[in-house]
Image (cartoon, grey):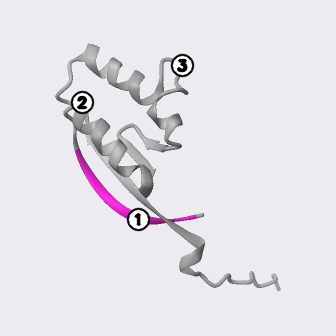
């Protein structure tokens, strides 16, 4: 018989608050999408706002942001005129 895995009790202290941003860049011209991507990820793919704020880029238009940096990311998306949606979540520390 296989050994039973010990289940860990979940506690709110094991989680931190975060925000998931989903956004659209459809309104941007191709050249502006490139500029947006550079601002987001940097020209080298590592030095933009994503690295500066320690954001997890979950998908093409999905960002996982710590709650303390959510306002800065929201301002960034507004600056570029992006439509976006926000979901508050708890993530494991």
Residue found 55% across the figure and 27% down from its top: 46
In the rendered view, tell whether residue 2 sits above or below residue 91.
Answer: below
Residue 32, compared with residue 23, is above or below; it is above
Q: Name the residue that disc number 2 marks.
A: 80
Q: Mark 1 = which residue? A: 89
Where the N terminus falls, by quadrant? bottom right
- Name the spot of residue 41 as percent of width and height, x first: 46, 28
Q: Disc 2 to disc 3, how far (Cα)?
A: 20 Å
Residue 62 vs residue 2, the one in the foreground? 62
- Picture residue at 58% right of the left edge, 76% below the top: 13
- Tag 3 and tag 1, C-beta contact below 8 Å: no
Residue at left offset 35%, top offset 63%: 88
Q: Nearer the viewer, mark 2 or mark 1?
A: 2
Instruction: Decide: few, some or many residues near mark 1? Use Cα within 10 Å; few <14, some 14-19, many ≥20.
Output: some
Percent position (x, y) of residue 9? 63, 85
- Tell me how far mark 3 sits from mark 1, CA to CA: 30 Å
Residues in magenta, as a range: 84-92
Q: Main secondary structure of the magenta part?
A: strand
Between discs 2 and 3, the one toward the N terminus: 3
| 89 inside magenta stretch | yes
- In the rendered image, residue 42, in percent from the top left (x then y), is placed at 48, 23
Is residue 43 shown left or right of residue 61? right
């Amino acid at each position: 018989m296989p050994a039973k895995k010990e289940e860990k009790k979940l506690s709110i202290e094991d989680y931190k608050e975060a925000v998931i941003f989903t956004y659209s860049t459809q309104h941007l011209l191709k050249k502006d999408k490139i500029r947006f991507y550079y601002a987001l990820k940097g020209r080298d793919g590592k030095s933009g706002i994503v690295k500066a704020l320690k954001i997890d880029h979950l998908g093409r238009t999905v960002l996982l942001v710590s709650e303390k940096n959510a306002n800065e990311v929201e301002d960034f998306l507004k600056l570029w005129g992006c439509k976006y949606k926000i979901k508050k979540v708890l993530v494991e520390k």
